[in-house]
Image (cartoon, rainbow, N blue to C red):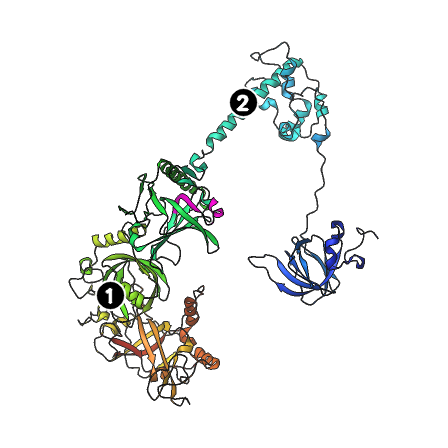
Amino acid sequence: MPTNDAPLFDPTLEVAADKIEELATDVLSRSHISVTPIMCWKPNNINPNTKYAVRTDSKLEFEIHFNNAPELVLQQRMLICLKGMKMEPRPTLKRPKLPFKLVFPDGVVLQVDGKIQDTFPEKPPPSPKVPSWFQSQTIPPSSPIPPSPSLASSPPHATSPQRTSSPPHSRIQIPFTKRELSRPPAGSSPSIKRQRTVTPPPQDWAGSSATGKSPRQSTEHLSVPSMRGVDVAGPVEDRSEALSVNNSMAQRSKKKRRRTKKSLAPERNPALDMVAGCWSPLGGNYLPLAELNDKISSKVSVIGVVRGISIPKITRNGDWMVATELLDPSTTEQTAFKVNLFLPESAKDCIPNVKAGDIVMFRKLTVVRFNSGVSGTGYRDSFQWAGYSPSQKVHFHSAHRTFLDEEHCFFLIPGEEELQYAARLVDWWSALQALAKSKPEGVPTLMTQPKGRSLITLSEAKVDVFFNCIVEILYTIPPGDQCAEIFVTDYTVHNQFFTRRPLREDQTQEKVKVYGKRVLKVVLWGDTQLEHARELETPGYYYIDNLRLKFDSKGFLEGHLQDEKRKIDKMRKDDPLLADLLKRRQEYIDNPPSPEGETSRKGSDGRDSNLHSAGDLRPPPPLPVMRPEPKQQGPPVTRLSFYHIVQVPIQKILGTPACPQVFRLRGRITAFEPYKLENFSVRYCKKCRNDLLPGSEACHGCADFDRIHVAYEYRFQMVIEEESADATGYRATLLVDVSGEEAERFISGLPPDDLRNSKRLARLRQRLAPVLGTLETYQLDIMANNSLKAITRGLYFDMLILSHISEHKNEGCLDNKRYKLWGTELIKGPT
């Protein structure tokens, strides 16, 4: 049986895997191999194909890649047809692994358990070929062009030019195309209508008019022989003259239409056709940015549009570092060229002060590979730069400075060629921005802020979410042994901020009088931050990186910054990132709030209600009439030791000077610490009352090697949000401590124990589920920087709060007053 006539997977067409290279192409399309898949790799970003490692009956191994592969069962023998197969060599492999792999890019035909599977895409059946009528009708080259019926039957107009004879070259032969046959008769054209000659159409055309069909439809049914057979009256010269007039008028109408279309099309700005790169006798060849990928380890000169620039930072060796991205006509937004510049501390004033949209010129940049990409590096002893202002059309530097002979000069003086090229770049960028109005998806955009963590205002900050911000430091508190405190603002309001007015009248912040909900206290931890805190200028504008907010003991937010790297960088007043803050500052000065307090939320007497939470010993203002509480839905969640205590809002709890005092509150948990429930239980020594060190199983100071004195105690904190909101919809929060016997009362039936045991931890999680909801999962996602899922809040419940004075003077806020859970028991739910 011939090979082409044999069915698929015929036993006679099976070939050995190591003989595939010797087969001809026509034989491969009908042959097949027998293999057993032993391993599978799913598609990924690097290899979009499904990869299988297979073994033949003769114990040979190789790989097969499928683009459109079915689900294959490992260790199951199958037959694979070699149709559409491509072989790629792998010469480094040795037996029993074959030195090649098979790739099926379009599909595969295979047989498993006697069933054939074909994954090749189905091709639509070819449409039947319709013979062309125009190609079937041949016209001799010498045949005259048949005139339209109206021209044949209408006499020439008196004003038409008359000729006794026409030379042969004046007759224009127009081939019969579909476009010509689809035109209406010449008698219906405007040129013929102006002749005002009424001519009855031929019999064939009269029939089409009677049926109401258009001339195009009737023309398609005519044949050239029938048109030639019509007896056309009049001399041949008249017919050719009428035809030439009609053709000339049709050509004029075509030109007119083309001129009209051309006038409607928008003219392309010639600046968009700019070619990147230039040459200067001073700087040599300024290369296009797209060609720098082939210049590794070379020193180059470049000129480009600044797409964005970072905040200057200090590196580990003490140098200043700033990064920028450049664009020119040879690049796109995705291929912008990145440049990293390094300057010594002595040349801090030479840091480029360009902004997004400016033109910058660099000489002696070194092209290097960094982070699997190509970038330019300006070293501290080699590179030079100059900026070009698009608005002022002049070059500039960051400082007026004279360099000594032994110092490296960071400034270059551009020549006429560099300035002309920079001006052309400005025109190109302006034309590109104009094009962005109609084609925004294809035009690069500027980076109005540095890359990295989000840059937000303080009013947008949330608890336990890291962010970057631009602030003005109002005043500082002298650093202690462990931490320092600074007070910052960006003149936006956050309802969970509160900072009292400065006590000393000589403070600079008194002149501006910014306090309350516009000021955030930031606590700096660590030796690096403490050393940096002594260098901060007040007032001054700074960029804070990686700031995190937490609740203080009063339930307000405060910032925490703890890192071994410098995280607060001073900004120049001409920095474009400062524009919004300076604008808000001027608005605040022009329209200052009431001197008694913030205008965002006042008490009934016009004073800021939060003043009393900061230790103000003046009597609290009269509370407004309490609104009726909503009826409680469902069974109660907690059981209280005393029910005769009247429920009060958090505002009154914070404003009550008497301490200790018991309050009744209804709220729910919005945050807690530690983030993991397994850390709610703390190990300590009953003998010395000290907590065990992390990782220790016993107290080393008491030599408790038998763990006789090891005990456990619940210790955690909850942020309580009250149920009833005020007139503005704001719900106050309070930080509540839960520890000791009151914690055991709250979680009754589950004494503190080692929560590293999964079963004990599951029981605690189930017990606290009604009041926590999915808060634990939500907080863990925040810690891990995972995508945040929808949060399910816990139930509102009644509780008793006991205020007390902290034993540690560094705790609390101003008066060291704290609040802890007291006399509250969580009712057991169904198990």
**Marks 2/1: CA–CA distance:** 82 Å
Residue at the spot of label 2: 252
> Could you say where residue 687 lies in the image, as x and y percent from the top left?
34, 89
- Per the image, the residue denoted by label 1 is 499
Residue 452 is at least partly visible in this image? yes
Residue extending farthest to the front is 406
Place of residue 146 in the rendered image (x, y in percent of width and height, measured from the top left): 67, 21
Give the quarter of the image for residue 170: top right
Please say whether residue 60 is one of the residues in the magenta stretch: no
Residue 27's place in the image compared with 39, above or below, is above
Tell whether position 292 is magenta: yes
Query: For this view, does 802 lie left or right of residue 829?
Result: left
Q: Which residues are magenta?
A: 291-306
Q: State which quadrant residue 476 falls in.
A: bottom left
Q: Residue sitting at 39 percent across and 46 percent down?
A: 364
The extreme right residue here reads 1
Q: Which mark is residue 247?
A: none
Query: Which of the marked residues, 2 or 1, is nearer the chain's N terminus?
Result: 2
| Residue for point 52% across, 28% down | 258
* Residue 760 versus residue 26 in the image, above or below: below
Residue 330 position within the rendered picture, expressed as x and y whole percent measured from the top left: 46, 42
Out of 437 and 425, give the one closest to the viewer. 425
- Left/right placement of residue 22 relative to residue 339 reads right
Nearest to viewer (mark 2 / mark 1): 1
Helix, strand or loop at disc 1?
loop
Q: Amino acid at mark 2?
A: Arg
Instruction: Give the secondary structure at mark 2.
Output: helix
Work out whether 111 lies above or below 680: above
Q: Amino acid at mark 1?
A: Thr
**Measured from the top left, where is residue 590 in percent x and y?**
21, 52
